[in-house]
Amino acid sequence: MNRFFNLAIVFFFILAAAGPAFAARDSNPNKLKVALLPDEDASAVIKQNQGFRDYLEKQTGKDIELIVTTDYSSMIEAMRHGRIDLAYFGPLPYVLAKSRSDIEAFAAKTKKGKATYNAVVIANTSTGINSIADIKGHDMAYGDQASTSSHMIPKSMLADNGIKAGADYKEHFLGAHDAVAISVQRGTAQAGGLSQPIFNSLVEKGVIDAAKVKVLAVSDPFPQYPWAMRSDLDSQLKEKIRSSFYALKDQKILKILKADGMAPISDADYDVVRNMKKSLGM
């Protein structure tokens, strides 16, 4: 009897130490914790999206707390442990999060009627690199290791041209898309990969000088960054969340989100990401 009592005590402390991973999750919380992409400065991202927060509060009837995690990995873990309810994932981070959490993709932004986007491989204009093949023997900058458009897609573009990481070039992970572009401009890395919309935005803002950095190649279109939510949320709440995204028409909010609108999307749309991840051995 003492043996079974002691085992029960041990199991109790294991559950206590595990904390949120084993805690019952509120299916209809008063506050929804919404995670945004950790691609840029956290305070700036939260400040820029106050209008979006106010819109979601009005549409869902819930308090909304905006969160920006330190990186994609911490965002995935926060979702896995129930510390966020709704998240704006990159395609690869979503695939990774989906494999570890009960979540569902439901919306993606549209641009010119399409829910797809592209990545680019860029180079410093003074290096003499004029094609992906020329990257051989140079340094290549990527963003977060779990990034789709700032790691997986450009790495695949190089691999398709017979250029392998480690064997043919040295890779550096800088954490964010803008850091990649700035590194290439400064010549710290001779080439890099990142999201085409982010690169274009950096050029438009004057952060990147188009005379110093050029686009070597543009990827095939990939499914846009998905919005995903906990599958165990209350069904009526989930419907309110979906509807609020699909009905979003406020041009000021959409401009901040770099979108024309929001469209339905499903988990199957990201099978292309799963297949590329497998082919690269990531």
Image (cartoon, rainbow, N blue to C red):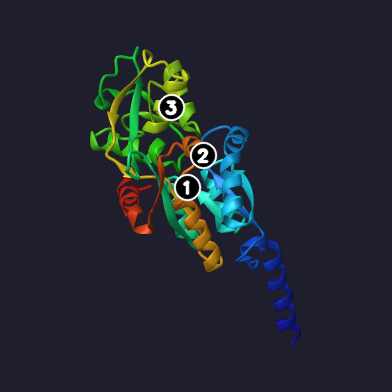
Q: Is residue 102 above or below residue 271?
A: below
**Is residue 245 toward the left or the right of residue 111 in the image?**
right
**For residue 189, what is the image quadrant?**
top left
Residue located at (67% from left, 68% from top): 15
Q: Earlier in the sequence, mark 2 or mark 1?
A: 1
Residue 183 visible, this angle: no
**For residue 82, what is the image quadrant?**
bottom right
Residue located at (24% from left, 37% from top): 160
Q: Which residue carries the number 1 mark?
A: 248
Residue located at (74% from left, 87% from top): 1
Q: Earlier in the sequence, mark 3 or mark 2?
A: 3
Q: Secondary structure at mark 2?
A: helix
Q: Which residue carries the number 2 mark?
A: 253
Q: Do tag 3 and tag 2 residues touch (Cβ < 8 Å)?
A: no
Q: Which residue carries the number 3 mark?
A: 201
**Is residue 2 toward the left or the right of residue 136 in the image?**
right
**Position in image of residue 18 (x %, y %):** 66, 62
Mark whose residue sits in front, 3 or 1: 1
